[in-house]
Structures are given as structure tokens and as C-alpha cells.
Image (spheres, rainbow, N blue to C red):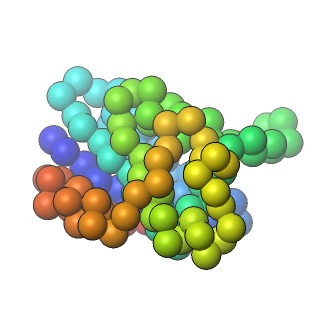
Amino acid sequence: MKALFILNDPPYGTERSYNAFRLAGALAKREGQEVKVFLIGDAAACAKKGQKMPQGYYNVEVMLGNVARSKGEVGVCGTCMDARGLADGELAEGAKRSTLAELADWTIWADKVLTF
């Protein structure tokens, strides 16, 4: 199965991005599954490197890295990055600047599209 996750919410303040990364990570670890995650709107902040959370709290940057290490792809809306002052060099390992055109391609590619 090929799954595309589209995240809209910020990394913290709600648990939507957290839950999306939990599910994406679990799927990415399974044999025969392909996962892509697209961060749009406030979710672009999920890809900010250097996130420091108090001990005992989840870290979305670490969760993003888990998806990428399991051969998942993570794209970040370039327009959304620019609007939030997020430069390419500030992206977490495993994340890349992307475009709406790539999101369209990924949507066509996917068997399932999950929106958070």
C-alpha cells in the first residue's frame, strides 16, 4: 500500500501532527508499505530542526526522523516555509522543501490519503 499523510496542524498545541507521525511511522516500518508525509500550513513547523522539548514530552522532529529512516519521504510546502520564515537550512534531517505540484503528484501516486 502507498499512503500519503497531509498534515496541517502545528507540531505542538494539538495532538494531530503527533498522531499522524505515530501512524506514519508505524506504517513505514511494515514490509511492503510506502509512506509519504506532506507538511502544509502550520505543519511546516514540524520540520524545524533543533526542537528541544522537556523530558517526558514527545518530540515531533524525532518522530519525523523515524519516518524518514524507515524510507518514508517528508516534503514541506515551500510557500508555507517562506511565510513562516523557515529557511531550507533549518529543516530537520529527512525533510525537504517541496511544492504543491509535488503534493499533486504524491496524491496521484497514493492508494490512500490521510489528512490530519
List the single residue furthest toward the right. 54
Q: Is residue 65 left or right of residue 98?
A: right
In the image, 106 versus 70, the foreground residue is 106
Instruction: Name the image quarter holding residue 62.
Output: top right
Whole-percent x, y for residue 8 in the image: 49, 69
Question: How many numbered callouts?
Answer: 0
Dividing the image into 4 quarters, which one contains the N terminus?
A: top left
Q: Is residue 60 left or right of residue 110?
A: right
Dividing the image into 4 quarters, which one contains the C terminus?
A: bottom left
Whole-percent x, y for residue 100 in the image: 33, 69
Q: Is residue 15 left or right of residue 8?
A: right
| Residue at horizontal 61 percent and vertical 75 percent from the top | 83
Q: Does residue 65 sit above or below 81 in this rendering?
A: above
Observer able to see residue 57: no
Q: Does residue 25 sit above or below 38 in this rendering?
A: above
In the image, 112 versus 97, the foreground residue is 97
Q: Does residue 104 sit above or below 96 in this rendering?
A: below
| Residue at horizontal 53 percent and vertical 41 percent from the top | 64
Observer able to see residue 22: yes
Whole-percent x, y for residue 34 in the image: 24, 37
Whole-percent x, y for residue 35 in the image: 30, 42
| Residue at horizontal 20 percent and vertical 60 percent from the top | 105
